[in-house]
Amino acid sequence: MAEIHLKDISHAYMPEPKGPEDYALKALDHVWQDGGAYALLGPSGCGKTTLLNIISGLLTPSEGAVKFGEQDVTTLDTAHRNIAQVFQFPVIYDTMTVRQNLAFPLRNRGVSAGDIDARVLEVADLLGIIDRLDEKASGLTADAKQIISLGRGLVRRDVNAILFDEPLTVIDPHLKWQLRSKLKALHQQFGFTMIYVTHDQTEALTFADKVVVMNDGEVLQIGTPEELFEKPIHTFVGYFIGSPGMNFLDAKVDGNQAMIAGQSIALTANYADTHNGKTEVGIRPEFLSLHSPDHKTNAGIRVTVQTVEDLGRHRVVKVDAAGTPVTVLVHEDEEVPSGDATLVFDPARTLVYRDSRLVEGVG
Amino acid sequence: MQRKHNQKAWFLVLPVFLLVAFSAIIPLMTVVNYSVQDSFGNNEFYWVGAEWFVEILNSERFHSALGRQLMFSGLVLAIEVPLGIFIALSMPKKGWGASICLVLMALPLLIPWNVVGTIWQIFAREDIGLLGHTLAALGVDYNYTQDAVAAWITVVVMDVWHWTSLVVLLCYAGLSSIPDAFYQAAKIDGASRWAVFRYIQLPKMKRVLMIAVLLRFMDSFMIYTEPFVLTGGGPGNATTFLSIDLVKMAIGQFDLGPAAAFSLVYFLIVLLVSWVFYTVVTVQDAEASK
């Protein structure tokens, strides 16, 4: 129906916030496109749930406005927004049957009995629970309860966006895949906006078209899974996304050369040496390679191999680069030198960060 | 599998067995002993069989005391349970307000029972009591020592004052265990305040509420101290409940045989009602978790 626009919002749980550290959610301006599948990813306590509750109306932001299309809904209460939310722990009404649970949001809104019956059947059919409609909801398993929570959102015709607050936390691992693909299928079928909060990157990257990475109340990057992988704009994103995460090494960057522990490596662009703060070189373990110590290259540094973990398809090698631990992914066919080695950087994949933020070079 | 039996293990249970025997079984057996005999002093006893039981069960005195007792317990439950739920719902959930409320609620429960009786005895007096005197000044004809209705109102209000807190605290504990997500989901589902109470709070409180009803039934059914101090069972026999009547019979008239039979009947009634109640609750629980 409409896009969701968060206009310069921020939120503090305390009444009189003084500095930025008092905000659970720091200033954010973002438009959630209608019909998008978004994931909100970040460690526990980073403000994901706060952001979600502001969209659903359970919280009113301290500053800024929430707009659904052209309508300002900042102070509109939850029941009157066309939003459904599924929580971390399944919420069902214990004393009701599955059918009554699904009918509840419609009954509260004064929908006629005939319409309710038809709609409940439709949604139950969609979710594959039509044969369990007359069971007591309290006796169901956690995943069935979570499906009913979802059903209570779907049953309303007006729902524009469904918000998920870590909905698979209490679900058995083998059922997580099933539920997630069900969600994706529903999304493709109906095209409502979905915002999915999680701290699990696999869940976020497989579910969403766009991933919003948050840390410490701040939105660090919004992008497709590829963008997050290839060009993390903040060191936290690089570290948090990917398994294992990105490597960062202190460096001195001048022109198209980076000096790491007194050894230089080549870069593909020119960077001015005007920065006084902390400069780092970031590279994903996938784009590093290990060679024998006498290997000739213009983009390598001397390291010491410390541990090798075999994960089957590839090996995770931890090396020591003049005191900084670096992780390297080595394909199963390749050799891993023991002891001293040369660590070679792929120049096209070597990124430069200043004060934790990505900087783009020239040329 | 062959299991080894070690008969010496019985010695481990022996202390508990002896303790229970001394504290419960032996005194109870003494009562049973009295209830089937008649005595004329001098330690002479005569076997009378079930005569005392027949007499008690047919006596007008027992019937009317039992009637008053049932009426009292019924009234007390009918007031304290809804009132307790209401207060628990209105109490703040967190912050300093919650702590203050909890302390205030716990206060009446900490007062010794005979002190509660004394407090109300003075509080409701027409000549010097704050309540009694105020009512008299307002022109209300209220005198709990003369008028049976006034006496009943005073006894019931006293019990409500003393024990509603217990229901409140139990309900409050039940309410605090409901995760926030339930209230949030209810908001999203557009539930009214009544629907939240009916479908979330009441079901979640059900267990503690059952315990509260059971405790309040047993306690009010066995009430003695407070009305004894307040009205002494009067005016006339208007507030003579079972335990007060029993004490009058046993110690006032020294009718040990009938009093013993009375106690056993009394005991069995409490046991029976509690058992029925407990069974209903457990059966319901088992059905709910199916």
Image (cartoon, helix red, strand yellow):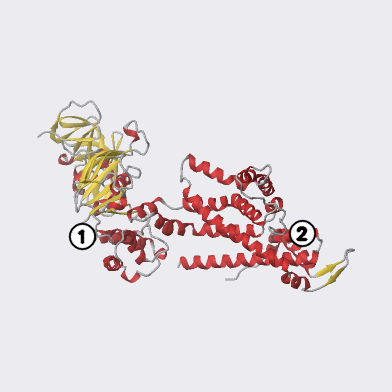
Residue A259, compared with residue B66, is above or below; it is above
The percent position of residue A130, horizontal first and vertical second, equals 31, 70
Q: Which quadrant of the figure contains the N terminus of chain A?
A: bottom left
Q: Is residue A289 visible?
A: no
Q: Residue at x 33, y 39 (%)?
A: A24
Residue extending farthest front: B139
- Residue type, label 1: Phe
State the residue in front, B3 or B87.
B87
Q: Is residue A35 visible?
A: yes
Other-residue count near label 1 (Cα within 10 Å), few / some / many at <14 / 14–19 / ≥20: few
Res B255 → quadrant: bottom right
* Label 2: chain letter: B
The percent position of residue B225, horizontal first and vertical second, equals 70, 53
Q: Residue at x 64, y 60 (%)?
A: B221
- Residue type, label 2: Lys
* Label 1: chain letter: A
Q: Is residue A44 left or right of residue B278?
A: left
Q: Marks 1 and 2, how far apart in space?
A: 78 Å
Res A221 → quadrant: top left
Res B211 → quadrant: bottom right
Other-residue count near label 2 (Cα within 10 Å), few / some / many at <14 / 14–19 / ≥20: some
Q: Which mark is residue B146?
A: none
Identify the residue under disc 2. Answer: B248
Identify the residue under disc 1. Answer: A190
Element under disc 2: helix
State the residue in front, B15 or B167.
B167
Q: Which quadrant of the figure contains the C terminus of chain A?
A: top left
Residue A83, compared with residue A292, is above or below; it is below
Q: Residue at x 57, y 58 (%)?
A: B77
Q: Residue at x 59, y 61 (%)?
A: B74
Residue extending farthest left: A363
